[in-house]
Amino acid sequence: MSLADNIDFLRNLPKPPGINTLEGLARGRASAGLSPISESTGFGSNPGDLRMFSYVPATLTAKPALVVVLHGCTQNAAGYDNGTGWSALAERYGFALLMPEQKSSNNGNTCFNWFNADDIARDSGEALSIREMIEQLAVDHDVDRKRIFVTGLSAGGAMTSVMLATYPDVFAAGAIIAGLPYGIATTMQEALSGMYRAAPRAANDLGNLVRKASPHTGEWPKVSVWHGSADRTVNPANAGEIVKQWLDLHGLAPAPMSAVDVDGYPREVWWNKDGETVVESYTITDMAHGTPLAIAGQDEPYGAAGAFLLEAGISSSYHIAQFFGLTRQLAPRNIEAAAVEPAAPADAIVSSATQKPRFAGDRRDARRDPAGRRSIDINGAITRALMAAGLIKSS
């Protein structure tokens, strides 16, 4: 559907509070259970037997960026889009969206098979299927090859690690939400150990797992890591292991170069010799397993709360889009407004070590960018977690 069609459709729906502007589009679409993504077939050999869904907005910019979004267990592409608001972000900022979807025939809980050796190797299984989808969209829509990104939750987060490791030549950056480092599991037993124990490994050993995954010798993708401190499905220590893995690849020391609060939550930052942030880590205090959202009281909400989609007062989708550098290039319908706004560095909001720390009570004020716009912004427990990881099937 075009933007105009979506607006006309939403006008005829019962309106929850706040749907009276174009910026209410995300809330309206999510509340109505709508997602504009559509399925494509014939995109390649598809050895992982995945489904391809995508969204290319009418407001697509020239040489657009492409964001790959990977859902978690028990989820599907459309549901995760509704929950996280990625298609609304794509529409506003003019980038293409790819949302691969797992089949229950591959995994009973529709988890991407991040622990299956055949699916996590370059040019094999599910990893290759996703790569083929990317190529199809890139060719069809003249995507900027230097601006391809990937993000995902839980099993999708672990699969994000897979894609960044196996195809570092493809991705400029990635964001891993409640996921695991690449290469720590190729069997069910190893997957369980990784999820629950998150045994610490030497940084170089973690880095070598990635180095051995492809013939890549160039620059490594940037990485954003998100994890709830109260996660009982994937041990939060995995966030530190992911950070350790990518710091080793970037040749950076473990101590963060900046540590501030963003929307009331701790964010640690590491940058390269050019001052560009290449690794960042958000700890969402007291949050359980899921993707953090900011919906309540927001003028421009992206997504809707649900299973593993958690209201936390911080919009991970928006901040990730910002980390990818997507929020600096507005969709054509916003060009006039953009023309009168001062340009800002990609990390102007949260990369400075001198930034005043933010606290929970400051979240509303914290969600503003330099131009003044509000940011869009274990018996039973073990069983449930095993199901969430796709290691056992639900009855």
Image: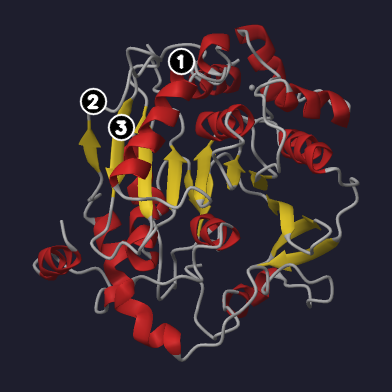
Residue nearer the viewer, 123 or 68 = 123
Q: Secondary structure at mark 2?
A: loop
Please state which of residues 120 and 128 is positioned toward the viewer in this rendering.
128
Q: Where, by quadrant of the figure, is residue 163 drawn?
A: top right
Q: Quadrant of the C terminus?
A: top left
User: Which comes sooner in the sequence, label 2 or label 1?
Assistant: 2
**Residue at the (71%, 19%) spot, across then down:** 184
Compared with residue 211, is residue 247 higher up or lower down, i.e. above or below?
below
> What separation in Å lies between label 2 and label 3 (alpha carbons)?
9 Å
Where in the figure is residue 5, as x and y percent of width and height? Answer: 12, 64
Residue furthest to the bottom in view is 340
Give the residue at x 55% y 12%.
116
Question: Which sits earlier in the primary sequence, circle 2 or circle 3?
Answer: 2
Q: Is residue 92 left or right of residue 180?
A: left
* Residue 353 falls left or right of residue 295: right
The numbered mark, 3 or 1, whose residue comes first in the sequence reads 3
**Residue 304 location in percent, x, y?**
37, 54
Label 3 amino acid?
Answer: Met
- Identify the residue under disc 2: 42
Seen at 35% across and 19% down, the residue is 46
On the image, numbered disc 1 is attached to which residue? 125
Q: Amino acid at mark 2?
A: Gly
Determine which residue is flagged by label 3. 52
Instruction: Indicate the secondary structure of the residue bearing disc 3.
Output: strand
Query: In the picture provided, is 259 more to the left or to the right than 85?
Result: right
Q: Pointer 1: residues within 10 angstroms few (<14), some, or many (20+)?
A: many
Query: Is disc 3 in contact with disc 1, using a CB cutoff of under 8 Å?
Result: no
